[in-house]
């Protein structure tokens, strides 16, 4: 159904999105040269957002573009296997002129923070940094300040922060040296350190300790193609992870922050180098630090990576899921049976 990788001009390459009968067959397509944009797939439950997601992912993979997707419902793994012909599907494909209509599996790599349904996805405490950790632990401003001081101390003393045990040991050291640190950095109260320690214990009991450690994930692991030139589709098993929404959102925001830190700025490439699909996207940006949101925006604008937000509400606001500013209109948007209009975004839609 799709072009073979390496055999098309990327300036003219298209990814078929959907076909509608309107006095004849008309296929809506996405140009690869215009695919380096923000994306939004919005709609109520059961309106086909997952199918749109799968079609896009298969299309990017066939054009040698790696894909990362968070599988919240556990229904995306079938993308790795070829489908089976069914009379209703064949009849529909013939009616809308979708030719050739063939079935293919796509190279899929499975990831799992808990290491049960795929390769373990890990990061070190140092990689995560105090900004994201503060959000994950739901710290207040005072506690976040103490955590920043702790990271500063670790940096000055050459302390390796790999897992939660390292961080807890660091916080114990900070509590013991609180008087000296207060004289240098400002107030470091033992009560704030104690609150952080309790949050770390809670995170460990929720399974967060399995995410922190080595070997840490490298971005190159997500940006590979198979021997046939198809981009790998990286699936993060999130059916259990989504039960811990702050951990889920923090991990995805960490990935975006890593893109900003490690990848060079580029202009407008012929096609994306990596495409991210984030389900339940509102979880990522609720209460996210402003500095981090600015990083997310710069990642999509300047590094040749495309981000698609997928959301069904409640009361979804598309502008809240896509970065604001001059590049706001440079996006791909698919609305599925949206039955209400958001007054403040009607102009943008």
Image (cartoon, rainbow, N blue to C red):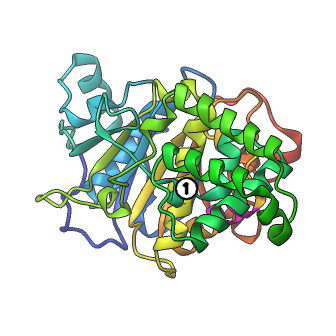
Farthest top residue?
Answer: 87
Image coordinates of residue 257 in percent, x first then y, are 56, 61
Who's the residue at 55% across and 54% down the image?
A: 254
Magenta-span inclusion, residue 329:
no
Q: Is residue 271 above or below residue 264?
A: above
| As drawn, 70 above or below 267 | above
Give the main secondary structure, helix, strand or loop, of the magenta stretch. helix
Residue 26 makes an appearance in the image: no
Q: Is residue 294 magenta?
A: yes
Q: The magenta stretch spans which residues?
A: 291-297
Where, by quadrant of the figure, is residue 298 drawn?
A: bottom right
Percent coordinates x, y for residue 233 in the rendering: 31, 47
**Residue at 62% over, 61% down:** 296
Q: Is residue 301 left or right of residue 112?
A: right
* Relative depth, front residue between 129 and 244: 129
Element under label 1? helix
Q: Is residue 109 left or right of residue 285?
A: left
Residue 111 in view, yes or no: yes
Q: Which residue lies under the disc numbered 1? A: 128
Viewer-side residue, 115 vs 1: 115
Location of residue 49 in the rendering, given as x and y in whole percent from the top left corner:
51, 32
């Amino acid at each position: 159904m799709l072009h073979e990788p390496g055999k098309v001009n990327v300036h003219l390459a298209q990814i078929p999105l959907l076909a509608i009968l309107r006095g004849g067959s008309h296929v809506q397509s996405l140009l690869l040269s215009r695919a380096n944009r923000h994306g939004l797939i919005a709609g109520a439950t059961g309106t086909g957002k997952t199918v749109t997601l799968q079609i896009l992912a298969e299309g990017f993979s066939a054009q040698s573009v790696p894909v990362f997707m968070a599988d919240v419902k556990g229904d995306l793994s079938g993308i790795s296997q070829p489908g089976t012909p069914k009379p209703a599907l064949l009849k529909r494909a013939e009616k809308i002129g979708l030719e050739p209509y063939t079935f293919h599996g796509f190279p899929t790599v499975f990831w799992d923070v808990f290491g049960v349904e795929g390769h373990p996805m890990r990061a070190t405490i140092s990689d995560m940094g105090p900004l994201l950790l503060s959000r994950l632990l739901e710290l207040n401003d005072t506690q976040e300040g103490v955590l920043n001081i702790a990271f500063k101390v670790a940096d000055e003393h050459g302390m390796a922060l790999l897992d939660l045990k390292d961080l807890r040991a660091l916080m114990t050291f900070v509590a013991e040296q609180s008087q000296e640190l207060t004289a240098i950095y400002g107030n470091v109260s033992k009560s704030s350190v104690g609150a952080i320690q309790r949050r770390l214990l809670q995170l460990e009991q929720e399974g967060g300790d399995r995410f922190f450690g080595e070997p840490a994930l490298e971005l190159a692991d997500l940006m590979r193609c198979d021997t046939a030139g198809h981009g790998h589709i990286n699936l993060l098993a999130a059916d259990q992870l989504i039960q811990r929404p702050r951990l889920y959102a923090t991990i995805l925001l960490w990935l975006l922050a890593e893109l900003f830190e490690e990848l060079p700025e580029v202009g407008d490439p012929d096609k994306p180098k990596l495409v991210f699909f984030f389900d339940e996207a509102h979880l990522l940006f609720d209460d996210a630090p402003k500095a981090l949101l600015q990083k997310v925006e710069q990642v999509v604008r300047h590094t040749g990576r495309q981000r698609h937000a997928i959301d069904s509400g409640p009361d979804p606001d598309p502008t809240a899921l896509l970065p604001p500013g001059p590049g706001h209109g440079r996006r791909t948007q698919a609305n599925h049976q949206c039955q209400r209009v958001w007054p403040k975004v009607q102009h943008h839609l």
